[in-house]
Amino acid sequence: MLNTATPLFTDESADLKHEVAQIVAEPDVWLHTPHAHLGGESPINLIGTPAESRLRDLLRAIKHGMVP
């Protein structure tokens, strides 16, 4: 289910659920909550879709303090 159009950095997991758990305090809640930076979509709905790269980009931004 990995979107190969978005190469991984060495510190990233191919498993987006695992990646979320490393970055946000309440991963299950975060995954099921619509997010403005994802066009109002819940992150869980993007895993395994062509839009998965948007989720990966958002996680990277959160991880590096670029998104509150």
Image: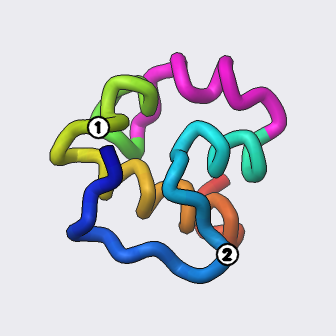
Report x, y in % for residue 33. 53, 20
Report x, y in % for residue 19. 64, 50
Q: Nearer the viewer, residue 16 or 63?
A: 16
Q: Nearer the viewer, residue 43 or 21?
A: 21
Q: Residue at x 59, y 60 (%)?
A: 13
**SS for tag 2?**
loop
Hey, what amino acid is under mark 1?
Gly
Side of 22 relative to 14 (left or right): right
Side of 2 relative to 15 (left or right): left
Q: Is residue 25 placed above or below 53 in the rendered structure?
A: above
Q: Is residue 36 placed above or below 13 in the rendered structure?
A: above
Count numbered badges in the picture: 2
Q: Residue at x 44, y 26 (%)?
A: 44
Side of 12 relative to 22 (left or right): left
Q: Looking at this view, name the residue that lies furthest to the bottom.
A: 10
Q: Residue at x 55, y 66 (%)?
A: 60
Residue matched to label 1: 48
Asked if the residues shown at circle 1 and circle 2 are in contact, with their CB atoms under 8 angstroms apart, the answer is no
Side of 54 relative to 66 (left or right): left
Which region of the structure is painted magenta? 25-36
Residue matched to label 2: 11
Mark 1 vs 2, N-terminal side: 2
**SS for tag 1?**
loop
Hey, what amino acid is under mark 2?
Asp
Report x, y in % for residue 42. 41, 24
Measured in 3D between alpha carbons, the distance from the residue under mark 1 to the one under mark 2, in whole angstroms, is 20 Å
